[in-house]
Each structure stands twice: as C-alpha cells, then as structure tokens.
Image (cartoon, coloured by chain):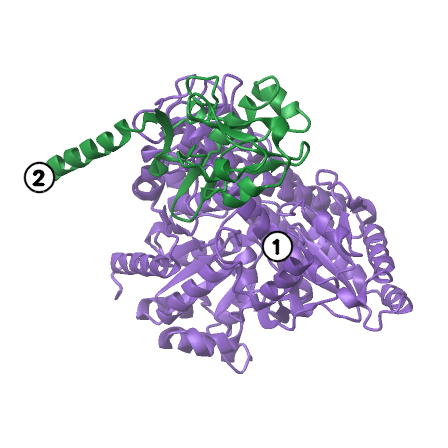
Amino acid sequence: MEKSIDRATCSVLRNAEKSGIRTVWERYSAQLPQCGFGETGLCCRHCMQGPCRISPFEDGPREGVCGATADVMVARGISRAVAAGTASHGGHAKHMARTLLRSAMGEAPDYPIKDEAKLQAVAARIGVSVDGRDAAAIAGDVARKALADFSEKDSPLTWAATTVTKGRVDTFLKFGVVPTGIDSAVSESMHRTTYGVDADPVNILLGAIQCALADYSACHMATDLADILFGTPSPVVTKANLGVLKRNAVNIALHGHNPLLSDIVAQVSGEPDMTEKAKAAGAPEGINVVGVCCTGNEVMMRHKIPMATSSVSQETVLLTGAVDAMVVDYQCIMPSLANIAECYHTKLITTMPIAKIPKALHIEFHEDDAKESARRIIEAAIEAYGKRDRDRVHIPDESSTAFAGFSTEAIVGALSLVNREDPLKPLIDNIVAGNIYGVCLFAGCNTVKVTQDANYTAMIKELAKKNVLILATGCASGAFARHGFMTPEATEQYAGPGLKAVLTAVGQAAGLGGPLPLVLHMGSCVDNSRAADVAVALANKLGVDLPMLPVVASAPEPVTEKAIAIGTWAVAAGLPTHLGVIPPVLGSKVVTEVLTSTAKDLFGGYFIVEPDPVKAAEKLITVLGERRRGLGLSA
Amino acid sequence: MKQVFVIPERCMGCRSCEIGCAVQHSKEKTLFSAVLQSPPPMKRLFVESTDAIRMPIICRHCEDAPCLRACISGCLYRDEKGFVRRRKERCIGCWTCIMVCPFGVVTRDREKHIAVKCDRCHKLDTPACVAACPTGALVLVDIDDMPKETRQRLVLAGQKGVG
C-alpha cells in the first residue's frame, strides 16, 4: 500500500527514509499484524479478573470470566470510545466557556468579545436576555449557562435542546437518550460499562447515543463560543500543503485543536515588534505561521493562515527541516513529534498542563496573560531559527489555493445575495429541482490504514459528478484543500451540470466572478455542528425532520475516539453515516446489526461501513435517492 | 511423531504464541518475571502477515534440516525425540544456519552472540506456543494424522455439497 497520494507528503517521506527517520507509516508496519481480538472488539480489560477475550470461532469460550458475552464486550468498548470522544470535546468546550467567563469579568484582557452579533444570536437562542445589556453582561450569562451544561441538570442540555428539530427532541425523549450534562454523560458511560453494571448490549448502545448527544452539545458550544471570542468565519482565500513553508522566514507550525492558543499566536505573530525581531535574527521574510490539523482549520478560517498538512502526516512538517517551532495544545498530537524534532533544530513547544511530552519545551499558556505567553513562544521560535541547518531544508513545491471559512452564517449570507427575503429558498428550490441531488458532509481524519487522501479524492469525484453538494470539516477539509478541491476550478472540473449551475449562480451573486468552490469548508472537527445547523435549518424550513432529508455524512479515513462520538451523534441525528475503516465491532452480531440497521428504525440514521471509496460513493448516492423519493422528488 | 501445524484462517494475529514462547524461554518462566528480565527473553517463532492472511512462522524441525547440515561447529544436533536443538557452548556465531534456513526462523542473540531457534519445548508435552494460542490456529498433530484429517474434511465438504 502506498503511504499517501499527496506528492508533497511523499517527497518529504522519501527524504526521511534516506535519513533513517521513522514515521507513523513505519511504526504501523512494525505493528502488523494487529491483534484480531482488538480489531473485532473481543477483548475486555475492565476488571482485574481479566483480561478476557472471546474467540470468534466456534470452539473457544463464549463469555468472559464475569459472563460478559461478545455482544456485551463490543458494546462496552464502543461506548467507552464515545465517552472518551465526548470528554475531549467537553474539555475543549469547557476551556472555551471558562475563558469567556473570565473575559466577561475583565480577567482576560487578551480575549475581548470579537463578534457581538454572534453573542446576541447565541444568547437569544439559549434564553439569555439581551435587551439593553452590554456585551460583557450578556457574555457572562452565556458562559455561566454553558458551564452549567457540564454537571447533571434536571433539564436537557441547553446546547442540545435549542439547536435541534422538534422531531429530534421527540425521538430522543421517546428512547430516553436526552443528555442532561456533558461531564455527567461521560461519567455515566464509564459507570454503566464497568464491572457488573449494564449487561444489555442494546441498552449500553442507547447509553452511548445519549453520551454522543452530549458530545454534539459540546461541539456546538465550542463552535459558538469560539465565534464569539474570535469572530464567525467568512470566506477567505489561502493556500494548503507543505509548500506554504518559507525558506527565508521563521516558520511556526500551530498544531492541535483549540483556537484559544492558536488564535492568539496568530494575532501576536503579526505585531511589528515580532517581525523586527525575526528580521534581526536573519529572516528577511519575517514570521510565517502555518496550521496543522484542526487548529490549522481555525486559524485558516479566521486569519487566512495557510494549512501545512493534516493529522496523519503531521510529522512531515518537521521533516522539511524548515520549521523552527511547532506549537501544540491537545488532541491528535503524536508523541513521536518530540523524537523527530530532536533530529533537527526544531523546538516542539507544549502549552497545556494536561498535554506534556518528554523532551519538548513546555511553555504553559495562561488566559490572563495569553499574548505574553504567545510572545515567549514566538521568541523561542526566532531563537531556534538561528540554528536551522540550511543544507537539510527540503520544502516541497506543492501548495494549492483553498477557499475556506464557509460558516453557516457565511453560507446563509451568500444565499441571501440570491434571495434576500428567504435565503434558504434557492437551496431548497435547487434540491427540489434536482440540480442539487443531496448534501454530503465529509468529516474525520486521515488514517495510516488507508493511503492518505485516497478515499477522500475518489469519493468526492463520484459524488460531485452526481450533483451532490459537498461540505467538509476537520482533516477532511485538509485533504480537499491540499488537493485543490476547495477552488472554483474544481467546481468547473468535477461538478455535475446541476451543481455547477447552482455554485456558479451563488458565486456570481457573491461577486466572485465564478462559481463557489466545489467543497464548502465549514471548519475544524469540532465545527461539525455548523453542518448540523445547516441541516436543521433546511428541515425546519421544509417542515420535516432530519431523517427525511437527502443529507449524508462520511468519514472515509477515521482515527479518533472523537470521530466515533461524532459519527454516533450523526446517526442519532438521522444521517446515514459512512465509515471507510471498519470499527472494532464485528465481534458482535448484535452490535453490528444495531449500528448498521436497527438504528435506522429508531433514529433514521445508521452506519454504512465500506472500505472501497467508489462503492461507498455509490451507496451514498443510492441512499440520497431513497430519501429524495421519500420526499416525492425525482431520484 | 507429532508436529506443530498452523491453520492460518484461525490466526487472529494476537501474537500470544510469541509471548508464550518468550516466557517459556525466560529464566523464571512466568509472564511478569519475563517482562522484567534484562536482557529480555527471545521468542523463537514469528507472526507474519499480508493484507489477506496472518500466521505464525515456526521451525519445522525438518527431517533433512539445512541448518543442521550447514552447522560447521557441531552446535546443532538432532535429539532423541527428533528435534533440531543447540549445544549452545559450541555456537561460534558464523550465522550459516541463518543463511540456509528456508523459513527464516533462526535468529541471533545479540548479547550472547549465538544462534537462537525453536527447541520445540522439548521438556513439555505441549509446546508453549500451542498452549498459548487462544483460537487453535497452532495445533500439535501427529504427522500421519494431519493428511488423514484433511482427507476427511474433504469428504465431509463433498457430502455437504451433495446434500
């Protein structure tokens, strides 16, 4: 199997191989074969009478020491993955809420309220009074209401109840999966999956869905609060791939997830004083900040900062020998970065108290003096620049133009240029007419188990040709950006005639002089809530619930527990959700059946597991056709 | 004579056989002491894989053993049970055995500078790898029974096909 279809990635990896530097691909090969019990979810380490495993063949033990069957083990395993994903998004959202509260109380001067319109919109939606109150007072109440969503309440989570359709609320009530606290949902998932608690696989899975809905709330909260503090994204034109690194600048790579760190570093990097220091250190082009992974998406949307690469290829950024500092916060940061940084002059800088890496430089990031922390980080990068070995610098030429930053507000804004009174009408009319056959949200990661980007690029060509409108978040965005799919040219080249006409009409109304890009970039992985907002608005406008809509989701190259949590809430939201990698559930017929079939009867959404990208696209098109017929539309 | 055979379609790739082998060749022969032993004990069989198949590769104790014929120092010999074993003190580290083994299951001990290979757990009734396998992918079967079992499976499959 090839490592990647990205030429920049491959070029850097060839160099690494010559130098004998091992990356995620070599570490994966060294792991092969991976244990089949783990792959099928048939091992349990939840108590000290274990570890237990169940043979998938007929003659092995049929249950663990406690009597847990294959179905129970698999259900418990997947439930704990959802809980870990929820804990991650919860941690991110809580960090944001605490900062907003400190901002409102005047304790975080570097985090002013940037987007008052968004603050007012969120406040109005969640029932915080806005009339005659100043931004700080409103922000304080919004932050307190957000923090209240973490412990167990007597009422449903505010960020779930106020952002979904009435039909979803009824469905969640009917199956008893309404979440009442984000942290408490994680805690309850850990409780019900520990030794001797829930032994009904279907009940465990319903618990996982409740937890996943808490994850959805955390994602939505994180997006809302990021927009309030840093601004709601609107379209920008920038570049993506390793070619965005500069030979004659201090290169700083921002990697991780939370804009609380990256946005401030981006702001400070533009200060004249910092540029002067970089120039004085011998870098005529000053400071060049680039993004990696999801924090890369955050600063790409809000600051036009170019994207160097995505999650699985994060090590390649350092392997260029041109990065002076890589600054990380949390999630998807490979510990191996420290070893690779050590092969160069590069400083790996950790910033969060919960995410340290041995051999990295730790500069702890504090909200009360965020800009000062950022300046210290940038100065460390400038200092490292002086030690860069120019003979070892290898920056590939590749970089693609990328139009990014299509928040829900930006999409509605563009549509309102076509129809001011009723912005969603052009979208709905074109879906009805068949010019837009349906909508597919691409989300998730890049995985070492699939040739990097191969599934994304194969699927988008099939779907676009059939007039499917493409939205993307997270490292799916990164893949499409690096391969030039976020451009008007890609629309010209790949979109079917109906889709091309719609994207051209909206693009021209928006003054682009051409079509919108083939992929609408909606943000980082936490921003999947933006795509959910678009779907909810469409459903409400049409007066139907989400499972009726011709909308699907796909994670063709998923890795993380966060992706499992997001996929699970997408299913609960009524979306057929494709996975391009087989999750660890095949050891249980019951769990496999519930996730891929029974869920459809309960929630309308279900998982479609298909490793072959062309077949996966065909399956999604078939599903969109079924849904169109369900609405009485041509298919 | 019994042989260790592999049924690849039952192999989960969990490497329990590798762990069982290394533990059996450790000083105290328990997992927890073996993981603390320094230098660590060495395994004598290897789980290998492609996209389609995974299976342990293990010494066949060949009747006409290339390693035995190639050993110039008289280290390798065939014991009374028919297993190809080492007289460790005679190994000079020439690695000829590694060169000629068609299965690649002779390796070297980097600390002691001698060749290492399967001894078929000659003191045990059931070799450690077979005992460790949770799915029955490694089986200890009489060499003459193996083809008979295969033939019977064929007949059974044919019967089902007809029925």
Write down the residue under mark 1: A294
Write down the residue under mark 2: B162
Viewer can see residue A240: yes
State the image coordinates of residue A96 (x, y, percent, origin top left): 67, 45
Q: Residue at x 37, y 74 (%)?
A: A496
From the rendered image, report the letter of the chain displayed in green: B
* Residue placed most toward the observer, A574 or A100: A574
Q: Chain of mark 2?
A: B
Three-letter residue code for mark 2: Val
- Determine whether the residue tagged by mark 2 lies in a helix, strand or loop: helix
Instruction: Specify the colour of chain A.
Output: purple
Q: Residue at x 61, y 32 (%)?
A: B91
Three-letter residue code for mark 1: Cys
Nearest to the eye among marks 2 and 1: give it: 2
Query: Which residue occupies the extreme left position in the image?
Result: B163
Confirm whether circles 2 and 1 share one chain.
Answer: no
